[in-house]
Structures are given as structure tokens and as C-alpha cells.
Image (cartoon, rainbow, N blue to C red):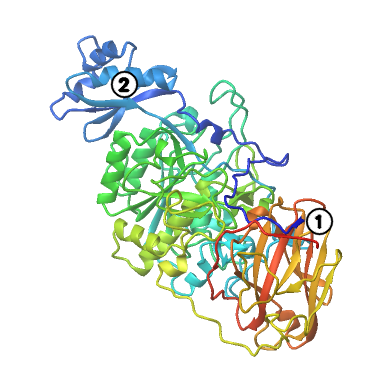
Amino acid sequence: MRKKGLFLLIVSLIALFIAATYREEARAVALDGPLPTDQIIIRFSESADVTALLVPDVNGRLATLSETAGVTLAYVRPMFETVHVVKLPERLDYAEVEDISANLSSLEDVVYAEPDRILQIVDDPQPSSPVTPWDLDGSVNIYLPFIARPSVNDPLLVQQWHYDYVPGSSEGINLLNAWDINQGSSNVVVAVVDTGILNHADLAGRTVPGYDFIHDSFVGNDGNGRDANPADPGDWTAANECGSGYPAQDSSWHGTHVAGTIGAANNNALGVSGIDWNARILPVRALGKCGGYTSDILDGVRWAAGLSVSGVPNNANPADVINLSLGGAGSCDSTEQAVYTAVYNAGVTVVVAAGNSNANAAGYSPASCNNVITVAATDRTGGRASYSNYGSVVEVSAPGGETWPTESNGVLSTLNTGTKGPVADAYVYYQGTSMASPHVAGVAALILAEYPAYTPAQVLSRLQSTARPFPGGSDCNTSICGTGIIDAFKALGGTIVTPPPVDNPFTNAGFESGTIGWTESSSNGWDLITSILPVGLTAHGGSWLAWLGGDDNETSTIQQQVPVPASGSYLAYYHWIDSADSCGFDVASVRVNGATVAQYDLCSSQNTGGWVKKVVNLGSYAGQSVTLQIRVVTNGSLPSSLFVDDFSFQSSAEIDEIPVGSVIGPFSKTTD
């Protein structure tokens, strides 16, 4: 008996592999537990004499706090209402700071005291080498690239798979169709609370004046404290700077990457495209070397929303949407929740990353806070990215990418080549829930452009009610990854329109007459066009289909001479991928006159779990009679199967059918 592949009941998580060309990132590792800190946030009662905090003598309030804490405390600053920040003599283990905070909370006029946690970027960035348009020539993409809108001339848009939606190939956010409805409004402001934003050519003209909220000069790495310059000087670190055992790190330019996804300049014949063409980006710098204090981050969030912050000028351009691609271990603190509730009540939508620890997001912050939209990350095929946090606190999912085994499966956006300070503009693939979050923030901005009066609750409802169900075979479901993958087109009120029909030039397009019209070939002697199917598998239409691969060291082909219509040259067919193999070994391809026009992996992570429509642009062959071939090649172990059925041509690249079917199997076939 030879097994014809395996439909996986559960898609196993893949251990993250970091190629030698990638810059190793310890930042994600640090999220496994709270970092040491040297600050505490205290909320006093309304009746407390907080002005006495400024008197450090033995009779002052600060002396009483120090005595209770068992260490000498220094006053840092007020935050809001009766919330203030004090400083310890040095950074201590988080558990020690929790104990000190508990002692302070016992005081009569203290409502609560809690560690001022160090939060960090949560992208798990595994950057590739910088991408330029000419890098894309001469190589075969193993996935069918989407067809970019003719009016959009950004050369790297065709590599931003995360914006498109081609079932079974690119489970992106269906953005290109959304642009036909609304491209954004300059009345909408999106704040990026992050490491700051560089003066990147593809972000020119997209920002409004921001602010640097980092008070600590070490963290800020710019020689000063808070100021009106939110530019990113770099967040590189030497070995052990962030704690014992932490390796040296290159600068991440994280905020610049996040900002590019939200709003890189569109149709400027340069680099990548942003989700929103017109929204203004507000840079708020709160993360630097080793991360950033929660108190700085929350001050930045309040200021971004137009709320007052002590000692800082009011924000002239309050945000409508705030993106926070950051986080840390530990559930939402009291101060955090108070700020996010205040911002929510001010009418501002806050979008946050779920985190990258492959754990329940309920144990991470701000992912576990109320009144925020928590975003999990999916990979190119719509499965949960191996690193992504999950759980009931997640509202929706969005593409975060997965740079293993192919870096182009990451999220492509703006960056810089500098390993310390900025050097030159670049475009780099990153992966992480940090990359998923700005997809949601960008679509939220488009929603507000289309529906300006929407409240944060209505924005969330729109995102959730129009989210696309997770594809068949995905290990995401509504219990752990939110309601689905965001769909920008549907969120703006779009509906799928069936492409105009084209007279079908195929002979026996659905194989219902057996091999008539087709030539089949199997290196191992299998009958490929068949009506004898394993229990549980049915043809897409009728009773017959073509079954390619499914054996070791097998080369299977079916082909037909067919005229490509002059106006309607998009080849469409249905396929079902069934594999137990890893990617990079078994492949399927579409060939025209012997030349490969589309190629894709047959592997377990690509399993469709049902029939999926595939569309290939054959425009360069329009009006010609060609030899069209579907080919599968497998190696010597873990065979893969490709089932195909119902060939036709259509007039556009649109997909008019959602994947159907369920994960069943395994299937097998005997040789007798």
C-alpha cells in the first residue's frame, strides 16, 4: 500500500529557524518574563498630600515611602490624576520590585503601587537582506504573485503578499480591492508608539510632528531626555547591556517598519505601498535601548490621544488610531487599564500586538487589557504564525508573516541598513505580531475614512463582523485567534463580484469523460485521471478529477492543447493540496509550452483542507493556442498529492469562491 499524502488533523507548530544571514533578536526572548526595573508607579488617594513628594528630607512624604519600601526612593514625575513615578537606586529583579510595591500599597493613602515594567518591541524580527526591485528578477517565486493594480506603480508592491487575497496562496487582507472603495483620508491620524520613525524617502510627507517620551538618557540613546524630536537614533545594544546574558543587538528600526505598513507613500514609483494612502502618521517615541518604561509608553499613549501630559505641550494632531507593537509578560496593570479606558472614552481606537511567545496572550500586556484591539499573527497560508500568542483576549488576526523557510513570506516594509545609527533607506522582511498589528491599524484608518463618525466599539465591530473565516486546515480558530483574518474590502462595504463568464475552450474541462482531450503521464505508472477516489474525497464537480503526485519519486503531468481567449486570459481551476512533507521538496507547477508560469510548494503547511480556486494570469499568451500542463514532482519520502478539477478561463484575477471542504483523511491507495 502506498499512501497518497496525509490531510493533517492538526497543523503542528514549527520551531523557528534563524538562518545565518539573519540578525539574531534577543528582544523576543526577553518577553518570556518581566525584565528587571528600577521604577514604581504609585496611585495615591485623592486626599493624599502628593506635593510632599517633592520634599526629600526626613519629614517629607518621600522619606516615609522610602522607609516603607526599605530602599531610598527618588521622585521622577507625575503622570495623570494622582498617579506618580518614583525610582529605586538600581534595577532589581521584577519579583523584588513587586514585593516593594506591595509594601507601598499597604500605606493608608496609597491606592496601589506596581512595578513600572519594561516593555519591548514584540516583532521577533528575523530580517532578511535589504530588498530592491532588481533582486526580484531571475528567480521563480514558489507562490503565484498577485496582480497589482495598474494605477499603483510602487515596484515592491508585488512582494507585499500580505495585502492580497488569493486563497491557498496569499491569505492577506484583501487590500487591493479595498482601494477601489477608499484610499484613506488626511483627516485621520494614526499614532505609532514605538522606537521613533526615520526620515525614510518612502515616508516623506506622511508624518505630523510627534514627540520623544523617553525620559532616561540610556534608554533614549540620544543624549537627552524628553523632547520634540521623535526620530529614531537606533536601539542597538552591546552584550549584557540589557541584563546578564543578553547578546549584542543591532538597531531594529522597528517603528519605521511599522509606520511603512500603515502609510508608506503610494504610487510614488518607489519601494513599498502603505495600507492608507492619505492618513497622517504621528510618531511617538517610547522605546529605545532594551525597551521602554510603561510610564513613558502610557504618557505617549495619552498624549497621542490628545489627553494632557504633565510637562509636555499639548498634541496639535490628536490621533484617531494608535498602534502599539510592543508588550511584555504579565497581565494588564491598573495604570495601563486606566489609560486605555480613558483613551477609549476619548474616542480613540487602540490596536496592540498579541505577543510572540507562542503562549496565551492573557498573560501579556497590553494584549490582555480591555478597550484595545488585540491582534494575533497569521502566516501566508492563513495558519497561526508559530511565534504568535493566542487566546480569548485576541479580537482578530492579520498577516504577521513567517520568514522560515522562505524570507519572502515575511512582511515587507520600510527600514534602514544601519546596524547602529541610520545609514541608508532599505526595505526588509520582518515577522511578528508587531507586523500584524499595523495591518489592523491601517485598515481601522480606512474604516474611519469611509465611516468618519465611528466609535472605537464600532470600528472593532466592523473589523470582526467582516473578518474572513480561517481557511481549511488552519490551526487558527475563533477560540484562539479572534473572529478571523481582517478583510479590508469587506470592512469598507465591498462584496465579491463573480468575474464575467468566458466561453470555456477546454475539452472535457472537468474530466467527466475520462481522459478525452487530455494527455496524462506518470513516472510510476499511475492512472491520473480517475473516478476511483478514496472514501471521504469527492470531486469538485461531477465524479472525476485528476490526481497528481502521491508517490515517492513521482513525476505526474496532465496536459491539453488549448486556445487562450483574447479577452479572458486568466486560467482558473480548483485544487486540493494533501501533503505530509516539509516545504521545499515536492512542487506543483503550471507550464505553458514547457515554460513554468506558476510554481508552488506541496507541503503540510500548504494543505488546503478542501477545494480552493487557483487563478493564473496567462495574459502574455492571449489569443494563442498553447500546450497547458499541470506538473507535480515529488522526492523519495513523505509523498504529496495534488488533486485538480474544473478548468476554465475568466476575465479577471478575482476569486469568486471561498475555499470549501473539511480536513479529512488520511487517504491511501493500494497497488493491486
- Compared with 540, 50 (above or below) is above
Point out the frontmost of discs 1 and 2.
Answer: 1
Task: Name the residue that disc number 1 marks.
Answer: 552
Give the image quarter of residue 598. Answer: bottom right
Which residue of the protein is positioned furthest toward the left in this rendering?
47
| 670 to the left or right of 149 | right
Amino acid residing under circle 1: Asp
| 194 to the left or right of 76 | right
User: How many C-alpha atoms fall within 10 Å of the one at disc 2: few (<14), some, or many (≥20)?
Assistant: many
- Compared with 492, 604 (above or below) is above
The image shows residue 605 at horizontal and vertical percentages of 64, 53
Q: Secondary structure at mark 2?
A: helix
Distance (Cα) linking label 1 and label 2: 63 Å
Q: Nearer the viewer, residue 493 or 482?
A: 482
| 546 to the left or right of 258 | right
| 38 to the left or right of 535 | left
Give the image quarter of residue 54. Answer: top left
Comes first in the chain, label 1 or label 2? 2
Q: Nearer the viewer, residue 319 or 158?
A: 158
Q: Nearer the viewer, residue 371 or 267?
A: 371
Q: Residue 74, can we see it? A: no
Determine the residue positioned at 58% across, 71% down. Answer: 152
Determine the residue positioned at 37% across, 24% down. Answer: 39
Q: Nearer the viewer, residue 597 or 5?
A: 5
Task: Name the residue that disc number 2 marks.
Answer: 101
User: How many C-alpha atoms fall within 10 Å of the one at disc 1: few (<14), some, or many (≥20)?
Assistant: some
The image shows residue 433 at horizontal and vertical percentages of 51, 47
The image shows residue 294 at horizontal and vertical percentages of 38, 34
The circle on residue 57 is none
